Image (spheres, coloured by chain):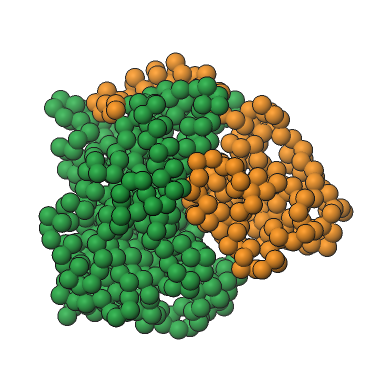
Chain colours: A green, B orange
Amino acid sequence: MSKGTLFDKVWAAHTVGTLASGQTQLFIGLHLIHEVTSPQAFAMLRERQLSVLFPDRTIATVDHIVPTDNQARPFVDDLAEEMIQALEQNCKNNNIRFYNIGSGRQGIVHVIAPEQGLTQPGMTIACGDSHTSTHGAFGAIAFGIGTSQVRDVLASQTLALAKLKVRKVEVNGTLRPGVYAKDVVLHIIRTLGVKGGVGFAYEFAGTTFEQMNMEERMTVCNMSIEGGARCGYVNPDQTTYDYIQGREFAPSGDDWDKAVAWWERLRSDADAEYDDVVVFDAAEIEPTVTWGITPGQGIGVTEQVPVAESLPEGDRAIAQEAYHYMDLQPGTAIKGTPVDVCFIGSCTNGRISDLREAAKVAEGQQVATGIKAFVVPGSEKVKQEAEAEGLDKIFEAAGFEWRQAGCSMCLAMNPDKLQGRQISASSSNRNFKGRQGSASGRTLLMSPAMVAAAAIAGHVTDVRDLLKS
Amino acid sequence: MSIVTTITGPAIPLKGDDIDTDRIIPARFLKCVTFDGLGEHAFEDDRAQLNGDHPFDQTQYQNAKILVVNRNFGCGSSREHAPQAIARWGIQAIIGESFAEIFFGNCVAMGIPCVVADGETVERLQGAIATNPQAELQLDLANQTIFCGDITAAVMMADGPRQMLVGGTWDACGQLVAQAEAVKATAAQLPYVGWSKIVA
Ligand code: SF4
């Protein structure tokens, strides 16, 4: 059993009591909702004649279904329109703050909460979305929940949960040029496996994470769930405090000093006990690309698609399935794999620093003939910032489309979709079969800079070659 | 609140590790404001690809109540649409080598037990069902045992969630709501609840 970690301290502070099942009733400090997983939860509340207990601790936005080109209402897609209307109505009826399109604050739920200063260290955060783990970057305990649990949080501001074990995932050293936070987390998942984290919270520790800015930490925590861990976090430090200070919902005045003092106390103790510890060396990490149908099927960009026999026995069947689905041959280099669509965006990599890195690669270059490349900012605010810096112009000059904020082709619940067998280079987080809107579409996950490089080359390439020249 | 102790009925084998929620219910079916009608779309893309050969399409399994799967079933997104689709198709319990965490939690919240068996047992079960699809499989949750023809095997489900099903308290909502005063007391102790008011 872990002891003295941030996870233990936050868990204890939020414990309301123990339920008959032995599970903990845990208070949820911040609840985020969106249009896809909330309508049924509100319906369940109505059915049971329950009301929202703490309407001031829930925030709503719309992200999954929003079109990224024509956002005029009513939406062209009737079902999407029905969903946004349901959310508007539910928020209005229950007095919940809603960041709608055009508010200047709409965006992917995991992008907007940190940028408003809503996400803070020491909070428990829940959202009907598995990538809620993102918020752990601030030293919050944040996890994805299902719709029945969204109902529970609305009705009681609590969840029935069993405590997780804590694994310290330590990465030390400086990342080599052209290697990004995305590569770090793909490397971790590749090594520990997609189910390696089941039952665990991941504490990301070590000098590599300490050197990362908040957006990079968010990229890492975002993909905890792809490694099976329901939540991941980084202990808060000065980088965290500098990011939060001055944001709309950040504490101010005397509260600020009290907050920092509290946050400092929550950090994992030097002698904290963990259920497990794994250590990585940052220098060993290469730009990483997935070749298969799970985020754990990743390789360094200079490597070959692994032959099944070289893999642990338990991974071979899914590798066979992946060769077949992806139409990639074991033993061939991933570099040079032609792509059709290049997507930069999502809650993993749709923040301003991601767009900056991609723009550095795209600047003065041209998207290869026949490639569809587009950039979708993670929020309206990211879009404004990027435009103020002229990033939109850099992308457009290079032949990328510049879109409105939303989830877009991360899961393709809006019009942005792969067609048929198209293969994408994508900065998102899931390469599952059919994930990007075509039942036979294929996805290669990589960092935004690598996606930009692939767009220019027309195939998977090593971004380090472009950065050198 | 209903008690979930024994589930008996024909079963359906679904082989493969890491079957994710996008495969269980593709994202386009999440465009809905109710869960109604999701059952017919369970595994839709996998089924289309197998052209009638997917177990969910095969006639011999159409009245199945218990699903038998392999490792890391239900990984990926938090969408409750996934277990809802499976349940609305007719499944009342799932036996597997392992389950993704959010999927497991969603199932418990819906009153659907997900029990774990070792790889060998799962393989034997899948084989036995394929040979005799109408055989009744019985899951005894209280004793953590399954029976299927001449197979009797131990299965496992963590005590907490299992007690909730067996004791009929799997729908946590009522218990949570009943503690409203204690919840408010906990909130009052948390420093941040005072400094970040986010009322609409
Ligand atoms: S960007 Fe993708 S992963 Fe993130 S919330 Fe949207 S759909 Fe989910």
Q: Is residue A228 above or below residue A289?
A: above
Q: Is residue B88 left or right of residue A335?
A: right
Q: How far across and how far down the image is residue B28, in percent?
A: 49, 55
Q: Residue at x 70, y 54 (%)?
A: B68
Q: Quadrant of residue A257?
A: top left
State which quadrant residue B140 falls in: top right
Q: Is residue B3 left or right of A295 when viewed as pictured? A: right
Residue beneath the point at 30% across and 57% down:
A69
Q: Residue at x 33, y 79 (%)?
A: A370
Q: Is residue A201 visible?
A: no
Residue B141 seen in the figure:
yes
Image position of A441 (left or right of B138): left
Q: Position of residue B103 (x, y in %)?
A: 55, 46
Out of A54 and A185, give the one closest to the viewer. Answer: A54
Quarter of the image where the N terminus of chain B is located? top right
Q: Position of residue A242 (x, y in %)?
A: 17, 43
Q: Nearer the viewer, residue A55 or A122?
A: A55
Residue at 45% in and 31% down? A153
- Residue toward you, B52 or B133: B52
Q: Could you tell me residue A339's position as x and y percent? A: 38, 76
In the picture, which quadrant includes the C terminus of chain B?
Answer: top left
